[in-house]
Amino acid sequence: MFLLVLALSGIGLAYPNAHVRDFPMHDLAAHSRPLNTERGLLDGIGALLGNVLEGVESLGDVVLEVGEILSGVKTGEGDYGGSGCADIMVIFARGTTESGTIGSTVGPAFVKSMLKAVDTFPAAHGMNLSFKGVPYPASFPGYFEGGSPQGSATMAYMLKEVASKCPNSAIVSTGYSQGGQLVHNSAQILAHEAPNVLLHIKAVVIFGDPDADQPMPDQIPPYTVKIFCHSRDAVCRSARDDGTWGTVPKIGLLLAAPFIGLTLPEHLNYEKETDYAAQFVVETVTRRG
């Protein structure tokens, strides 16, 4: 009981009500993960991948393997849109333990919000939408690795494929909770292995981002990035750049996992932000100049 109380001590700290956090890259450069160009993925985010990808020499090998896996993947449960190109193509990574490919909470709500925004926003009149989830094992071990290595490589591959096959589409990279880690990781992978792909990403949205202090690569302008972090959400608050949410809260989150509905309510209600997120996306991708 003492360990549980100690571990959860950071979760109960009071903050004002929910707000949206934007993270300009120039303010966060000091927090970016170091990347080594000699071995791409392994050296670049080796701390995240650990032993899972031991022996793989480059991202190319990983992307090839992921491509072979995804070649037989059918449209996931909850995905929207066909297999062709759309004006706006959303790639979404669900949160830990969620089912399907877009999950059961934020993902489905975001699909509905995006459809409504495309239908009602004047500049988006006549645009169509594709919304695809990243198939990956959304498990707690993946979260504590800094985001599933397999999921990170899969998301990078999916973004690369969309950019290649649909060069005129506006790509939106988005995720919830651990899915936010995948958004960050996939962007870093592409920044070192296929940076031109990032130029096709016109908006980035993350809900409850565990890596909220990590900047996006230079190819993604800060004004295209929106991070939603509820003020009492211990998951994204653990990423505060003042260092006050270090190792203990992460241990706390692990111990609290069986009671997550009771201990992390502010991490589980991001559906209420999806309308605002969709408005941001549509306004951003239709922005002129």
Image (spheres, grey):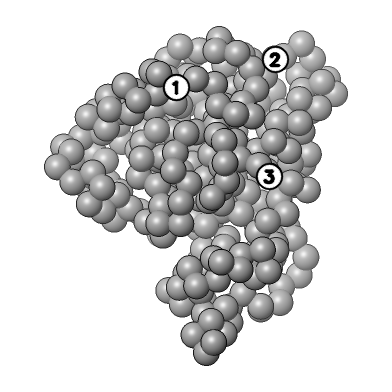
Mark 3 lies on a secondary structure that is loop
Mark 2 is on which residue type?
Asn
Relative placement, left or right, of 247 versus 121 is left
> What residue lies at 27% left-to-right and 24% top-to-bottom?
64
Dot 1 alpha-carbon crowd within 10 angstroms: few under 14, some 14 to 19, many 20 or more: few
Relative placement, left or right, of 84 versus 285 is left
Whole-percent x and y of residue 210? 52, 57
Label 3 or label 2, whichever lies nearer to me, is 3
Whole-percent x and y of residue 109? 73, 38
Check disc 2 and report the residue beneath it. Answer: 128
Q: Earlier in the sequence, mark 3 or mark 2?
A: 3
Check disc 1 and report the residue beneath it. Answer: 73
Whole-percent x and y of residue 245? 51, 73
Q: Earlier in the sequence, mark 1 or mark 3?
A: 1
> What residue lies at 55% left-to-right and 12% top-to-bottom?
83
Whole-percent x and y of residue 205? 61, 41
Q: Earlier in the sequence, mark 2 or mark 1?
A: 1
Instruction: Give the Cα distance between marks 2 and 1.
Output: 23 Å
Mark 2 lies on a secondary structure that is loop
Of 282 and 61, the residue lying toward us:
61
Mark 1 is on which residue type?
Val
> Which label number is shown at residue 93?
none
Residue 133 falls in image quadrant: top right
Relative placement, left or right, of 156 versus 20 is left
Question: Which residue in the rendered view is the most extreme toward the bottom?
Answer: 2
Of 273 and 261, the residue lying toward us:
261
Instruction: Give the Cα distance between marks 1 and 3.
Output: 22 Å
Instruction: Give the Cα distance between marks 3 and 2.
Output: 23 Å
Check disc 3 and report the residue beneath it. Answer: 105
